[in-house]
Image: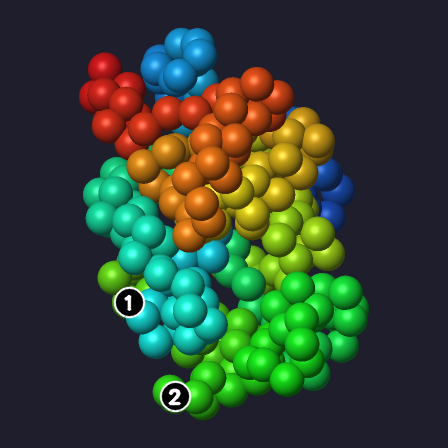
Amino acid sequence: MTTDMNAPLRTLGVPPTAWYVDAKTADLTRPGLEPHIVTLATDTKTLRLDLAKAAVVVIDMQNDFCHPDGWLSHIGVDVSPARNPIGPLQALLPVMRSLQVPIIWVNWGNRPDLMNLSAATRHVYNPTGDGVGLGDPLPKNQAPVLQKDSWAAAVVDELEQKPEDVRVDKYRMSGFWDTPLDSILKTLGRTTLFFTGVNVDQCVMATLQDANFLGYDCILISDCTATTSPSFCWDATIYNVNQCFGFVTRSSLIFDAVKG
């Protein structure tokens, strides 16, 4: 970026929303990224979308939710369904990175002192008060449940996080509540969001709904999501996304779209 005198301007911010400045000039034109238009089939409509304005949001693919030694398994939940997205995500994420689509990891990661969690939130995860709830050590490995930077809150080993990926800690079911997720997406200029992760009827759905309320285009990738809830919860989620909040597709259809 240069002025009329061909003097270089310095980048201030993250393209494509950066300014370009020197002592006398501030260029606010924000040149856009080169469009990458694809046609994507979904359950309800064929979409035309720009991958230069898209991001993949991966929600809660963490040890506490997906690992046999994690917290959900400890309280008696069969976590095998929560592991189903691992294989599809292993195939999808490298392709999306190669297309310069940002990968946003949104993980439940509480403060060690739990000061930003109400009693009502903690009650959901420890209703009797004497169980293993948020921040309590897991009996098998003493990892504090869903605590930021602990093994319990870490992404499962099977999914590789790259240095260029973005990480966001959340503290509620929605990844937008009291987090910088919205600000990050605006800075990146991303308005179309692909949703993946677990549980589809809880944290994925809550985040997707808030994204819809904030004006984002929402696309759920069904084979890259799962739930440990009963099957009717899955059915209701898919119905509601299609009916009210966005679109539903599959990773194979994304591969077809980007090849085209």
The residue shown at (36%, 54%) is 82
> For this rendering, which residue is in front, 173 or 236?
236
Q: How many marks?
A: 2
Task: Using the rendered image of the protein, determine whether residue 50 is visible from the camera's viewpoint.
Answer: yes
- Residue bearing mark 2: 141
Q: Are marks 2 and 1 in contact (CB under 8 Å)?
A: no
Quarter of the image where one finds residue 185: top right
Q: Is residue 124 left or right of residue 99?
A: right
Q: Is residue 191 above or below residue 198?
A: above
The residue shown at (33%, 68%) is 67
The residue shown at (67%, 38%) is 210
Residue 157 is marked as 1
Secondary structure of the residue carrying numbered label 1: loop
What is the x, y in percent for residue 163?
38, 61
What is the x, y in percent for residue 41?
35, 15
Q: Is residue 136 left or right of residue 253?
A: right
